[in-house]
Amino acid sequence: MKQLENRIAIVTGGAQGIGPVTGARLAAEGAKIVLADVAPCEKAVEAIRGTGGQATSVRVDVTDAAQVAEMVEHCRRTFGAPDILINNAALASALDFKPIEAISSEEWARVFDVNVRGVFECTKAVAPAMREGGYGTIVNMGSGTFLKGMAGLPHYVASKGAVVGMTRAFARELGSDGIRVNCVSPGLVMTEEMREHATMGSEAVASAQIGSRAIPREQVPEDLAGAIVFLCTGNSDFITGQTLVVDGGSFFH
């Protein structure tokens, strides 16, 4: 039997990068997948279906509570109540490195709206069904930048620190209801979007990242998917409130 047979998973940020790869890995373990994004997810859905998996998609802005509620209802109508939530949606590749004084209050607020409020809204929306079912697992997407610091992206770094804090708070609150909440913190993941980024996709940054790792190679979305699947299966039933660093040994803690 597959590890996630008949489980139902919502993956936000499901259109590109880490999201569709994670959805495919969860589907390979038997989960039914809802890919959610502001962008279309049809290509990723068809890829999962092409391998025999079950998947659907829904358009959602994770900062909009009404849209998030509809995302959960779409999941219920299609497959049933969600057992798994992967809070992957975030603003990252759209950001440019800037000195503090060049970051507007509006840009700061937008990063926190997506990266922090989005995690809150999605968790808030799935919690009642998970409480009712007495089971659930939530995996939030953190970042190694919070652990090491990074100049030029203080709003992004701070937002990911908030995600780690929420992970711990949610884990304390929801544990007695059978719901586990953990966080996965990657290094620089070379998605297609990151490769196109003027700074993060540069050869100099890529070389520096690789050079900082105990496993000296590029990090790709597939490197995260296995860790996320682990945190969703029975193999991690007694793990909650933790931040699992998946960065090839760039940061040890």
Image (spheres, rainbow, N blue to C red):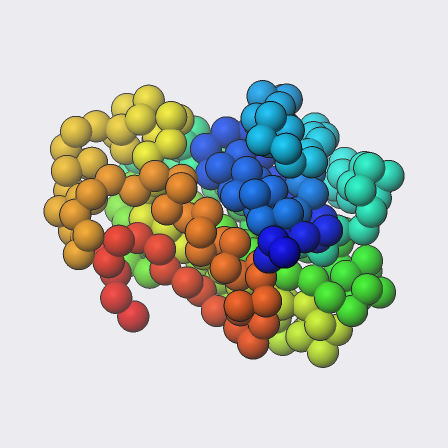
Vertical order, 217 against 184 (above or below):
above
What is the quadrant of the N terminus in the image? bottom right
Report the residue at 41% width, 48% height from top: 224
Q: Quadrant of residue 15?
A: top right
- Residue 50 locus on image (x, y percent): 60, 26
Q: Quadrant of residue 181?
A: bottom right
Vertical order, 101 against 120 (above or below):
above
Report the residue at 53% width, 34% height from top: 20
The reply, left or right, for residue 72 in relation to residue 197 is: right
Q: Nearer the viewer, residue 243 or 109?
A: 243
Q: Nearer the viewer, residue 112 or 172?
A: 172
Vertical order, 135 against 67 (above or below):
below
Report the residue at 17% width, 56% height from top: 214
The reply, left or right, for residue 245 in relation to residue 44 is: left
- Residue 142 locus on image (x, y percent): 45, 53
Report the residue at 33% width, 60% height from top: 147
Please indicate, yes or no, whether residue 124 appears anywhere in the rendered image: no
Q: Nearer the viewer, residue 233 or 172?
A: 233
- Total labels: the figure holds 0
Please indicate, yes or no, whether residue 97 appears anywhere in the rendered image: yes
